[in-house]
Image: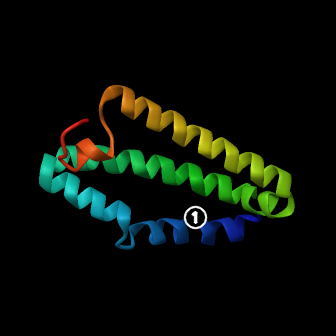
Amino acid sequence: MSFQTLSLFVPACFAINMAFGPNNVLSLSNGARDGVRASVLASSGRIVAFAIMIAIAGLGLGALLLASQTLFYRHQAGGRAILRLDRREADALGTGVRRARGRPRE
């Protein structure tokens, strides 16, 4: 990617990130529930994750996944495995969706 394209791509990504969406709703709810400090810390983590996604997109992973069906399915399987591990960890800790919604654990 040329420097000129990159100089347009990165600011556009951050501008899109600032649009009102799920991340900003989460930040607002964290701020209302836990205070400004918790909201800023959580936002910092999301910004780091977003910067990593920008770097991956800028390096051309999207084009690579479009070109290789095998690589796409491997990438997809890896994502499913991570989500399963995260779910098991949440279940082992007794956290997760049920508890977050205020329902008692079974």
Q: How many marks?
A: 1
Closest to the observer, 18 or 91: 91
Q: Residues within 10 Å of mark 1 (few under 14, many from 20)?
A: some
Q: Identify the residue at horizontal 57%, vertical 49% (top origin).
A: 52
Where is residue 51? Give x, y as percent: 53, 52
Q: Is residue 70 left or right of residue 75?
A: right
Locate the C terminus by quadrant.
top left
Q: What residue is drawn where x is 67% and y is 42%?
A: 78
Q: Is residue 27 above or below residue 12?
A: above
Work out whether residue 39 or residue 68 is closer to the camera in this orientation and state it.
Answer: 68
- Work out whether 10 lies above or below 52: below
x, y percent for residue 66: 80, 64
**Can residue 55 be spotted in the picture?**
yes
**Residue bearing mark 1:** 10
Residue drawn at x 38%, y 34% is: 90
Q: Amino acid at mark 1?
A: Val
Q: Residue furthest top?
A: 92
